[in-house]
Amino acid sequence: MTETGITVEICAEGLASALAAGQGGADRVELCDDLAIGGVMPFGWTVLDVCEGLAIPVHVLVRPRGGGFVYDAAEFEMMRGNISWIRACGASGVVLGLLTADGRVDRDRTARLIAAARPMSVAFHKAFDAARDPFEALDDLIALGVDRVLTSGMAPTAMAGLGLLAELHRRASGRIAVMAGGSIALDQIPAILGAGPREIHLGSAARIGGVTDPGLVRRIVEAASMGMILHITTRPKWEWALALGEYRADSLATEGFLHGSTARQVAGSADRFFRGRTDLIVLRIDPGKVRAPIRLEKSPHSDQPFPHIFGPLNLDAVADVVPLVPDESGAFAWPP
C-alpha cells in the first residue's frame, strides 16, 4: 500500500512479468495467462513459482477460457479444482467472475467457489461490467462477502466510466473494495483516484513489448502515491485569486499548465527556482477536486514526472495554504 493508502495491483502474464511487478514496487500481482483473449488461469507450475518468488500478495485468475462468463458444469468443476491448487501454492487470493444467462451474478456457484477459496481473498473480475445492472450486481457481491470488484464502470475504459466508478465507490460504503481498472494510462491516475477508489489495477501501462517493466511499475506507484499536489506561489497572487474566483499562474499563459510538485519534490523545486525568497506560500491541492485535467509529465530538470494542471485552478480544490520560509542558508524543507 502506498503512503496515501492506495493499493496498486499489476496484472502480470507469467513469472518474469510477476517478478518485475514486485521489483517495481507493486502492492499486489494478479497472475494470469493469455492476455490477448482477456486472461485465463495460468499454467499450474507458474502459480507455484510466482508465489515462491514474490513477497507481495499474489492473486490468481480463475478463468477456464476466454469469451463470456456463463460456465457449464465441467468448466465450473475445473474452476473449483484450480482454486484448490492455487490455495496449495500459497497464493493470497483468487480472481473470478460468474454470471447467469440473463446477466445476473451467479450467486449460488459464486458462493460455492468463495467457500472453496477461503481463507484466501476473493475478487470478482470484470465479468461485473457484463452484468445487466451494476447496482444489483454490487449488492449481490456484498451479500456474498466478496472482498473486491474490478470494474471500468461498465465502459471501455476506466476514464470513460469514471462517473459510475464514483457512484459504485459511494454505494459500496466500505463494504467491498471497488478497484478501478481498464486501460488506465499513467497521467489518468490522479483523476481515477479522485473518483474515490482506493485500489487501481493496471496492465498495459506497465508493459513494454508485452512484458511488465519494473521502471514503468515504479512510475505507476509514484503516481498513486502522489497525494496532495503542491504548488508554490506568493501570498499576493493567492489573494488576487481569491478576489478573481480562480487561481491562474503565469505559466498557464506561457506553457499551458500550472506547475505542481509532490511532497517529495516541492523542497527541491523551491530551492531550484526560489532559493532565499521569503514571500512564498504553498497551495496544498486535492487532485480529486481539480476540475482541469491533470497529467504527470517529465520535467527538463528531472527524470521524475511532475503533476501539471492544464487549466485554471478552482479554489475549492485548495485544501490548505502553508507558508514556505527558507532557513538561514536560503534553502527550503518540506514539511516546513
Image (spheres, rainbow, N blue to C red):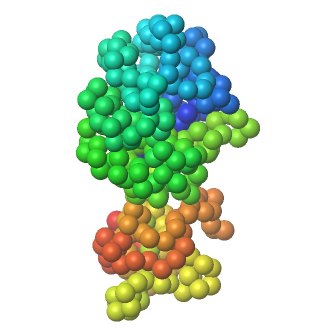
Q: Residue 128: horizontal and vertical position, in percent?
A: 44, 35
Task: Tell me the quarter of the image containing the C terminus.
Answer: bottom left
Q: Front-most of 284 and 180?
A: 180
Quarter of the image holding residue 136? top left
Q: Front-most of 79 and 283?
A: 79
Q: Front-most of 278 and 299?
A: 299
Residue at 48 percent across and 80 percent down: it is: 312
Q: How many marks?
A: 0
Residue at 45 percent across and 47 percent down: it is: 153
Is 295 situated above or below 272? above
Quarter of the image holding residue 2? top left
Residue at 48 percent across and 44 percent down: it is: 154
Is 314 situated above or below 172? below
Answer whether residue 108 is visible to the viewer in this image. Answer: yes
Q: Residue 172: horizontal and vertical position, in percent?
A: 29, 43
Answer whether residue 279 is visible to the viewer in this image. Answer: no
Q: Residue 148: horizontal and vertical position, in percent?
A: 37, 34
Q: Residue 117: horizontal and vertical position, in percent?
A: 37, 15
Q: Name the residue furthest front.
A: 102
Whether residue 133 sits left or right of residue 145 in the image: it is right
Whether residue 214 sits left or right of residue 130 in the image: it is right
Task: Tell me the quarter of the image containing the N terminus.
Answer: top left
Residue at 55 percent across and 48 percent down: it is: 157
Q: Name the residue furthest right.
A: 209
Is 259 situated above or below 199? below
Is 278 situated above or below 38? below
